[in-house]
Amino acid sequence: MSDSKNYRKLRIFVASPGDVAAERARVHAVADELNKTVADRLGVTLQVMDWREVTPDMGRPEQVILDELKVEKWDIFVGILWLRFGSPTGGIDPETGRAYDSGTEEEFALAYRSWQKNHRPRILFYRCTRAPNLDQLDPDQFKRVKEFFGKFDKDKNHPGLHQTFQTTEDFERRLRQDLTKLLFEYGEKVLQKSPPPPPPELPGDDLTKHYLDFVRNEHGRIRLFGFLSHANIDVRLLDVFVSLRFSDRWREMGMKHLPTAEEREENTLTPPQVLQRAMQKKKSLLILGGPGSGKTTLLKYFAVCCLDAAGRERICLPQPLIPIFVPLRQIDPAKPFTEALAVWALAHNQNITAKNFANWLHNPGALV
């Protein structure tokens, strides 16, 4: 990591009502993840500006927030809407004289007018399209959401492009992709730095290639089981893997009560974040969960992602590692680890010696 005093800061302002709190939390998670990978390599820090950190004061609450988190400081504006548009803030649009219908609307108006004058902040707006529970639907609120997005048309109030998503995981993937692209653009235009070069590839010798093909064939596909045997479907793991969410043990996090839904969301981690934490700290990771919770599938996912650059990008792995996926029951604890691995490999028709494994563990390294 380069010296933090040389970092350039990009500030992200997030506007959203309460029904997309899970997606809002993912903005923080994605920013933290990119700060350890792409942003760090470019010498940039992403900072999510959060109204919950604003110093309390008297006056109209929305104005207190905007006075401290001034629009002039926003580099990126992220807007998220689903079913709710929000509640009136008491603010008046100075150009139309109309009362704002929500804080999200008022914040977007500031961002859009700033963009018109100064070409910043960059505006990223996302609409959730998943089907609602009818008990959640307020027709008046939803009508305002539809009217707002209708104004993105080319001949309307604020023409532009917004993106849609179905699930929270879809939003996270989309946002990660968009922020990564913006970071590269910022690096090229402002910092005059090229995008980070691709990491070195795995060794290209025949033995390594043969072993990696073995891992791909062994773990790259999973079988989805139907009610009838002929309904079982063989699919690529990377096509169907559902991103799990992880948390530290609540006791370790200093919590003396069962966490609320919001506390759970704030303290959960994605698979890439879990892997990064393990590599940065103790170089080891213990995953606990009940039967069928996805522990084995997660480890297979990590192994398959190690096989190429695209997979490593999925889990934010900065360097190539040889994946070694082996059940503990197949390792003889009485033997040195590399010898035990060689015995395991031979049992799977892989002619890999203890010395080969030792070399892999040293260079380029391995994810075991």
Image (cartoon, rainbow, N blue to C red):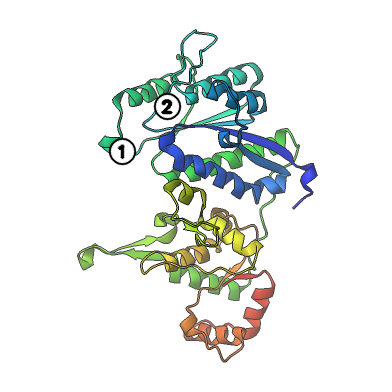
Whole-percent x, y for residue 288 in the image: 46, 68
The amino acid pointed to by label 1 is Ala
Q: Which mark is residue 351?
A: none
| Residue labelled with disc 2 | 86
Q: Are marks 1 and 2 in contact (CB under 8 Å)?
A: no
Residue visible at 69% across and 71% down in the picture: 363
Left or right of 149 in this view: 78: right
Left or right of 220 in this view: 309: right
- Using the rendered image of the protein, determine whether residue 120 is visible from the camera's viewpoint: no
Residue visible at 39% across and 56% down in the picture: 240
Q: Secondary structure at mark 2?
A: loop
| Residue labelled with disc 1 | 131
- In the displayed orientation, state which residue is furthest to the left: 228
Residue visible at 53% across and 19% down in the picture: 109
Q: Is 101 above or below relative to 194?
A: above
Q: Secondary structure at mark 1?
A: loop
